[in-house]
């Protein structure tokens, strides 16, 4: 199922290349500078019940692996960006702000903060990516314990708990 459409527009005068993202069904139009496309991660799952992503970030292999973990529970929901699909775009950040990763609610874009992740173990990086993908899927934080992907913190939890799964089921039913 194709969830979004993309159109390329070239601004020859400014030598910048932009992509206009037109969401199907009369949704929002977003104009994104092409310069950001090398650090793409994810977008919010939409009414097509899918989340397309392009892992062109410092942690591309881990993003692919994290998508596989979520897809192990609900197959095919998270998919690599294809020719006729598009996601919202952000880049990795390198900021001393106490935040390891951020998912932006309206767009579902994810930024991973290399300032902190560079010193994380592979398991802690994976947890952060799984956690942010969970937000892109519409799942909130789980505060009951630190044994869930959707628990906040510098954690090494890399498998879905029953609470992660039930939260995902609820979010999925709302797409």
Image: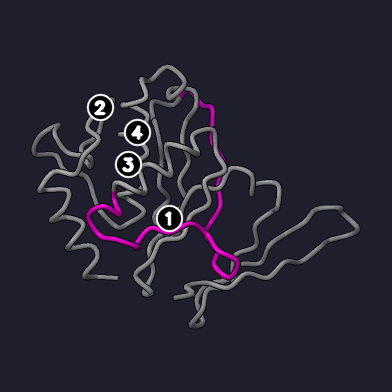
How far is disc 1 from disc 2 in space, using C-alphas?
23 Å
CB of mark 4 within 8 Å of CB of mark 1? no
Most extreme residue toward the right, as rendered?
13
Q: Residues within 10 Å of mark 3 (few under 14, many from 20)?
A: many
The numbered mark, 3 or 2, whose residue comes first in the sequence reads: 3
**Local crowd size for mark 4, using a 10 Å CA cut-off: few (<14), some (14–19), many (≥20):** many
The reply to whether callout 3 and callout 2 are in contact (CB within 8 Å) is: no
* Residue contact between numbered discs 2 and 4, judged by CB atoms under 8 Å: yes
Which residue is painted at 25% across and 53% down in the image? 139
User: Considering the numbered disc 2 on the image, is that residue within a helix, a strand or a loop?
Assistant: loop
For label 4, the residue is 126
User: Where on the picture, by quarter, is residue 39?
Assistant: top right
Query: First in sequence: mark 1 or mark 2?
Result: 1
Label 3: state its secondary structure: helix
Check disc 2 and report the residue beneath it. 156
Toward the viewer: 115 or 121? 121
> Marks 2 and 4, Cα distance to the nearest angstrom?
8 Å
Whether residue 157 is in magenta: the answer is no
Queried whether the magenta region covers residue 73, the answer comes back as yes
Q: Which residue is located at x 26 percent, y 29 percent?
A: 153
Residue that badge 3 annotates: 130
**Foreground mark, 4 or 1?**
4
Residue 93, placed above or below residue 35: above
- Looking at the image, is mark 3 or mark 1 nearer the viewer? 3
């Amino acid at each position: 199922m194709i969830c979004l459409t993309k159109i390329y527009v070239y601004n020859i005068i400014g030598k910048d290349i932009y992509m206009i993202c037109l969401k199907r069904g009369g949704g929002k139009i977003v104009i994104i500078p092409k310069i950001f496309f090398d650090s793409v991660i994810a977008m919010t799952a939409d009414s097509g019940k899918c989340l397309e992503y392009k892992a062109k970030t410092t942690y591309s292999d881990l993003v692919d692996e994290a998508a596989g973990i979520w897809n192990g529970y609900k197959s095919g929901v998270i998919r690599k960006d294809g020719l006729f699909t598009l996601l919202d775009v952000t880049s990795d950040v390198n900021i001393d702000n106490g935040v390891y990763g951020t998912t932006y609610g309206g767009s579902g874009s994810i930024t991973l903060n290399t300032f902190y992740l560079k010193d994380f173990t592979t398991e802690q990086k994976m947890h952060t990516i799984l956690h942010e993908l969970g937000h892109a899927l519409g799942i909130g934080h789980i505060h009951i314990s630190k044994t869930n992907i959707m628990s906040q913190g510098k954690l090494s939890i890399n498998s879905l708990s029953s609470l992660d799964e039930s939260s995902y089921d609820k979010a999925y039913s709302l797409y």
